[in-house]
Amino acid sequence: MSERAKSCYLRSNSDSLTTIYLPDSTPIFIGRSPETNITDTKCSRQQVRLCADYLKHTVSVQQIGIRACGINGFKTQKDIRSIVKHNDYLEILYGKHIYQIEFNPPPKEKNNQKFVRKRSYDSEDDSLSIDTTNSFKMRKIKDECNATIQETINTNDYLKNEQDNEGLNSTASTSKGNSIDNNKTKTIDFWEENKKLLIYTPSNVQNRTKIAAYDMDGTLIKTKSGLVFPKNCNDWQLLFPEVPKKLKQLYEDGYKVVIFTNQGALGIDKVKILDFKIKTERVVQKLGIPIQVFISIGKDIYRKPAPGMWNELVNYKNGGLNIDKSNSFYVGDAAGRRKNWAPGKKKDHSKVDRLMAINIGLLFQTPEEHFLGHKIVPYVLPTFDPKALLKDDNICHPTDAKITSKQQEIIVLIGCPASGKSHFVKLYLNEYDHINRDTLGSWQKCISAMEQSLIQGKRVVIDNTNPDPASRERYIVVAKKYNVPVRCFLMTTSTEHAKHNNKFRELVDSSHAKITDIIINSYMKNYIPPTLEEGFTELVKINFVPRFFSEKDKELYEMYLLEN
């Protein structure tokens, strides 16, 4: 029995028609719509009902519109269901808007299976169709309540027809929906996807210990339009003429070539995933060697400079082979180069490619260095280096300051979001009553909870941002009311450090409320340093020294996580 399909698509040779995904066991209606790009007024908006069966590798086709559809060149009848299979052709209107059925992976062919003859669909021009009047008989095979439409001919005629249409023979998931040549080595290309990552693996990719890794946009290709971002999925060309030759030489030298690309527009539906898949396949085809492609579509561990795509390759997509980092490298254009790094050049839009290479320990080159042999030019790294954080035990300044007191007191923490306040409280002030606005919802509730704790004789820590004297005064007034001393603990975490903490928290704790850079920047803009004159008995500066639940978390924290 054939392996259950993982996906099913309608693909067309026509650039004007979009690729259409058919989910498993879920009826969908296809017709005139923006999704198909069919504008023909003769075509109904619900022209045909389709339902894919991934287990049987079949698609149920039912004409709903008034005008006939076509299956392998034959007209359908309204409300009559037919069954089509992998590589069969479907015409949304008879003779027009032609698609080919594609299951991935395709069903296995049986040795004694009869071949199916179809019209040549290089064009939607009916003049190109093959006259098959006397060469075959059409027969309908009943299958429960459905009908299978096939055209059967002998093997020799089939082979001749395939030779006449050699341009249609390619891999199972090529961008133009081409069919498999049953008389050559069978090849199956695979797409894997979830909400975070797409992976394209051509069938002839070989797992190897040496990796030649590349970014895509601005590294292997550029826009034809000259715009920074492509107008559509056809707006691309090779960056340099030297690119294919270089990649072919590396492939022949024993490298596995892979692409790591950030494509956030796919995750917010600004670009259709199916269209981008077609673009990816065409780029790989143009480059002329098998290339495995990793596409990050979210803002998670897979997005560069985070190491998620690399880890996916190492752990799951290289056949268990250990990668030789010393003989591997990464090439990308987001390299942190300054303005005029070459005459008239703008500064690089980002540093993510260089930072990813640093994170995973690979040699890094820009496209100009790699393909054209240019010299290394100056570049800028982030001001915040997570590996350079203070690692000793002096978390306080002054160093002789006591973190806790045996006497009843109030500690007011000051620090921007993600500066490490709550982390510090959990590690060092876990015996204090923890008052937090994020938990309680308002400063008024914080005051109420604080008073209840003071009445019970407890020590209290106020874990809020408290950026200015007005926000801090509320707690100082209550402290004076109960005649309890109040100290100020000021987090020294820098803006970039806080953003790094925030990103790390997003990557390891999806349940935590997300904080945008705008919130952090706004805090820093409105921040007023505390003074003893506000009523504090002591000011203590706190250096954020992270502690980790695992070595894996520590390793991630010490990587560059911010894109700029």
Image (cartoon, rainbow, N blue to C red):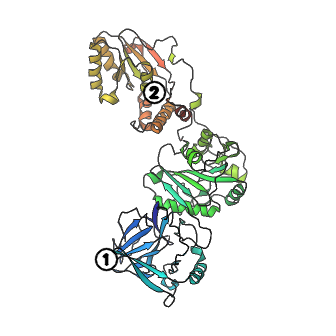
Residue 246 image offset from top left, x and y in percent: 70, 57
228 horizontally vs 289: left or right: left
Residue at left 59%, top 67%?
A: 186
Would residue 517 be visible to someone looking at this image? Answer: yes
Q: Which residue is mark 1?
A: 79
154 with respect to 36 (left or right): right
Residue 288 locus on image (x, y percent): 65, 63
SS class of the residue under badge 1? loop
Give the camera-side residue of 378 and 302. Answer: 302
Q: Which mark is residue 93?
A: none
- Residue that mark 2 sits on: 420
Say how many tags the image has. 2
| Spot occupied by residue 403 in the image (x, y as percentages of width and height) | 45, 14
Of the two numbered discs 1 and 2 on the same chain, state the one appearing first in sequence. Answer: 1
Q: Name the residue rendered at 57%, 59% in the picture.
A: 223
Is any atom of residue 231 visible in this view?
no
Q: Amino acid at mark 2?
A: Gly
- Could you tell me which secondary element the residue under label 2 belongs to? loop
